[in-house]
Amino acid sequence: MEEYLDLNHAVEVHAVKEERRKTVYLPHHAVVREDKETTKVRVVFNASSKGRNGLSLNDCLMVGPTIQPELRHLVMRWRLNSICLGADIVKMYRQIKVHEDDADCQRFIWRNNPEDKVRDFKLMTVTFGTACAPFLACRALKQIALDDGAKYPEAAERVMIEFYMDDLMTGCKFVKQGIEIYKQMNELLNKSGFVRKKMGK
């Protein structure tokens, strides 16, 4: 949870008595993965938990259309390349900021120790587990290509059609082109704060 606060992905809410009409508190729990070298503990927020009115946050959200390619088509295209490149965006959802008003629908309570006072927080980025998260993430990624793609043609085309959520599966025929794809992809995604965990062949 400290990472959320350090990265400003969550902020403390001090004036909880001055509630806005649309305020939702999300239950959460930790998922521990012993098989992972990095990110062994991940916080999972439950946006499907029902409130007193019988509705969950996910019940009230617009999901949005599927705008990413089908995985099987993407894999088949990827395997036709002489040189295959892959990359993964680190914490993709958490790189996308939500509107300040909408952050009140992503509140949670937390304390570091059982003897500490419970404090109120709100998530300031797209949250994994919300019904609209996949659409928002894919749409934000495509917007990067629309905004700055003219300067990075090798990367922009691939951002539009060769990402499956946070995973890039692309390729080419020649080493020189592969180096250019790598360079342009790094520059294009860096401009919008998306950091790759890896990009290799």
Image (tube, grey):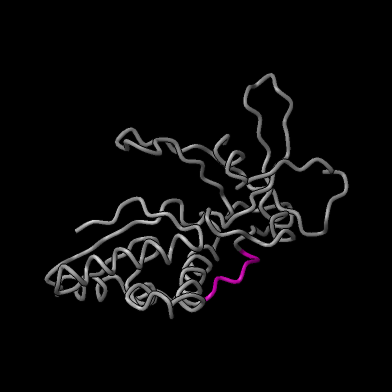
In the shown orientation, is residue 177 left or right of residue 123?
A: left
Number of marks in the rendered image: 0
Residue farthest toward the top in the current orientation of the protein: 115
Residue drawn at the location 64% of the way across and 59% of the way down: 57
In the shown orientation, is residue 63 left or right of residue 55?
A: left
In the shown orientation, is residue 194 left or right of residue 124?
A: left
Q: Magenta span has 140?
A: no
Which image quadrant: the C terminus?
bottom left
Residue drawn at the location 59% of the way across and 54% of the way down: 47
Residue 54 percent coordinates (x, y): 69, 57
Residue drawn at the location 74% of the way across and 26% of the way down: 117
Give, as a single range, the part of the protein colored magenta: 59-64
What secondary structure do most residues of the magenta stretch adopt? Answer: loop
Residue 160 percent coordinates (x, y): 39, 76
Residue 63 percent coordinates (x, y): 55, 70
Which image quadrant: the N terminus?
top right
Tell me where residue 4 sits by quadrant: top right
Residue farthest toward the right in the current orientation of the protein: 18
Residue drawn at the location 51% of the way across and 63% of the way down: 192
Residue 143 percent coordinates (x, y): 51, 74
The one nearer the camera, 58 or 83, is 83
Tell me where residue 64 sits by quadrant: bottom right
Is 55 drawn above or below residue 70 in the view shown? above
Is 117 drawn above or below residue 167 in the view shown? above
Is 151 drawn above or below residue 3 in the view shown? below
In the shown orientation, is residue 169 left or right of residue 133?
A: left
